[in-house]
Structures are given as structure tokens and as C-alpha cells.
Amino acid sequence: MKRLGSLLITIIASGWMGAVPALASGQPMGVVTSVIPVAYIVGEVGGERVEVDPLIPPGASPHTFEPVPSDLRKVSRARLFVVVGGGFDAWSDKLRGAASHALETLALMEVSGLKPLEGEDHHHGEEHGEEKAAARENEDHGEHKAAARKEEHHGHEQEHHGHEQEHHGHEQEHHGHEHAVRGGSEKEGEEEHEALDPHFWLDPIRVRDSVVPVVVEHLIAADPEGKGYYRRRGDDFRNRLTALDEQIRRELDKAKSRKYIAFHDAWTYFGERYDLEKVAVVQEFAGEEPTPGEVANLVSSARAARVEAILVEPQLSPRVAQTIAGEFGGETVLVDPLGDPGDPARSTYERLMLYNARAFGRALQGKQN
């Protein structure tokens, strides 16, 4: 991610950037998305009137993605940028800022009626390691916090910043080596930092009811002449999403169990929609392998729930999951939250969702308790 700043400066300094892209007669409108599944959705609505470019390529992880010069060129040619939002693709802010024209942006996590779910691990990038390290440091400093609280009855409260102390009569808050004074209670401060799960597209009903109508309206705003075309395609896609939901239910009805273990915590929306129960997640923080104690707990949980597979993803190495599955006599099953236009089984939104439904069906073959 650090490369992005120097990348943008280099390209802007070269004088390459052009004017606002215009819609030439007969030419499709340029739309850029951050991830492939959003490109699938926009493409279904836009049809031949749009040319959609997802920036994160197949097989790449959003956790480690870094834009390259060709991504900036795509953004500068586009009239609309559709992102997930909610911090999932925060790197897109710099790309939009470097464009030479005011680029209309649609952040789908902010769509009215979407009702995002809470997540456990959805800050992508360096924040993961920083937050995990801060959490561990908080445990180390637990005794310091307890001691500081004893001073409150003396008529003043403390706030610690490393080795510096201030006595100004305000409430002390000590969180490792970083500290901030916030209004309200400690619980309220924690709620401010609750993460929202960005993987809303793994629920076709949310896509049908909240995402597609907004995409239709944004395409119409950017290309008014295509109003009727976009509305017809949007209605058709919504009808197909209703049928897709029924197909997914039929696939999952074949399973003997509703409990699953995933490598990455991406399936909250899918699980809520189809009444699936998450037993455990192998990698709670992106790029950070589980400790021996966490592995032992995961194996124990798998045995207790009679789970016989771990769901792995093509964007992440399956090595750790394969080792853990071997510990409880299980296997790994490939699912894909992002898709791949080069693979016929995952080359459209509907195909991707059915691929995942069938993969879950294979994994959910654990014995009934």
C-alpha cells in the first residue's frame, strides 16, 4: 500500500492525465469496480452499454492488493466508480483523488436498506496487525489500568501517553501506547469501532432488493439515454436473483449438517440467509496464522460439531487449513467469495453463487449430533 503514494505522484507528474471521459456514439460507458463480484452485478444491469473493469484481479486478495499504473488509467477513463465501501477498499480513495475529473462514486455499503452485518475481521491492510498488536498490549497493561483507576477518588483522573502523565481532572483512558479522550462510556467507545462485514454480495436477496435498484439509478444518471435499457435489465436480473435464491436453497437442503468452519470469515451474510452456523474461523486476522492454542481449540470444536471439512479460498494459501483438517480427520473444500471471469464455473454472479452453494453442500456432510 505504501507504493501507491509514489505511484500516483509519478503518473501525475508525467502529465498523462486527460479530461473528463465523454460518451462517444456507440461506445460503452466506462465503469470501474474494486472487486469482481461488484463488476458482475454492474455488468448484468449495464449490459452492452457499459464496459466494466474490476481492479482486483482473479486470485488476488483484497487484504494485500496494491494498485498499479494501469489501474489509474482505468479510473481516469471511467465515468462511474463502484466500490464496496466500509473500509474494505479504502485504497480506492487515493485513486479517485488522482483522477483529473470528478469521478462519480457509489459505495455500496452505504446504500439505504442494505443493513450491513457486524463482522469480526474486516479491516483490510496494515490495520489488522496494528489492532491485534494493540489488543495484546492492552492485556499486558491491564495492571496499569487497574492501578490508575484507584487514583480517581483523589479528585483527579489520569490519561497516560507512553511515559508522559497529565493531571487535568479528566477521565483516564489507557490503551497500550495509543490513547485518546472520548466522550461517553468505555462501552460506547468500543461500539464506535465495531467492524461491519463487507461481503454483502454473498446474499443474493440483499443484492436483489438493495443493490440492483441503486446501480440502475446510478447508471441512468451517468447515461440518461440508456434509462429504459437499464431498467429492463435491472428488472430481469432481480427476477433471476429470486430464482437463484431458490436454487441455492435446494442445493443446501441436500446437506446433512448446517455447521461449517471457514478459513476466512467471509460468509456471515451467506450463513444468515441460508441458516448456516459458523463453528470457527481458521484465520481471524488477515495474514496472521493461528497460535498452537487456537489450533487446538479449533480441532476440538470441529470434533464436537462433527464438522468434516474446512472451507478454503483461492485467494489465500490452504496450507494451514489442510494441516488442521488432517488433525480432525477432515478435508478442505474450495469456495470463492470473489469469482474469476476466466473460470466458466465462476464467471458470472449467478454461476459464482451456485458454485459456492454446491461447495457448501459438499462440506456440510458432517454427522448429525
Image (cartoon, rainbow, N blue to C red):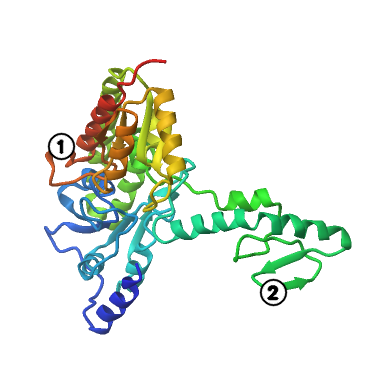
Vertical position of residue 211 compared to residue 166: above or below: above
Residue ID at (22%, 33%) = 355
Depth check: give the residue in front, 32 or 28.
Answer: 32
Q: Is residue 190 visible?
A: yes
Label of residue 308 in the image: none
Residue ID at (57%, 58%) = 137
Q: Is residue 275 visible?
A: no
Residue ID at (70%, 55%) = 143
Depth check: give the residue in front, 309 or 62.
Answer: 309
Residues under labels 2 and 1: Cα distance? Answer: 59 Å
Given the image, on which type of amino acid does mark 1 rest? Ala
Front tag of 2 and 1: 2
**Residue 157 pos. (x, y %):** 79, 63
Vertical position of residue 97 compared to residue 289: above or below: below
Depth check: give the residue in front, 290 or 36.
Answer: 290
Q: Secondary structure at mark 1?
A: helix
Q: Which residue in the protein does label 1 denote?
A: 345
Q: How many marks?
A: 2
Residue ID at (83%, 65%) = 156
**Residue 146 pos. (x, y %):** 74, 54
The 10 Å Cα crowd at callout 1, few under 14, some 14 to 19, many 20 or more, is some
Identity of the residue furthest to the right in this view: 154
**Residue 188 pos. (x, y %):** 65, 50
Depth check: give the residue in front, 62 or 45.
Answer: 62
Q: Quadrant of the N terminus?
A: bottom left
Query: As drawn, is 276 to the left or to the right of 340?
Result: right
Q: Which residue in the protein does label 2 denote?
A: 164
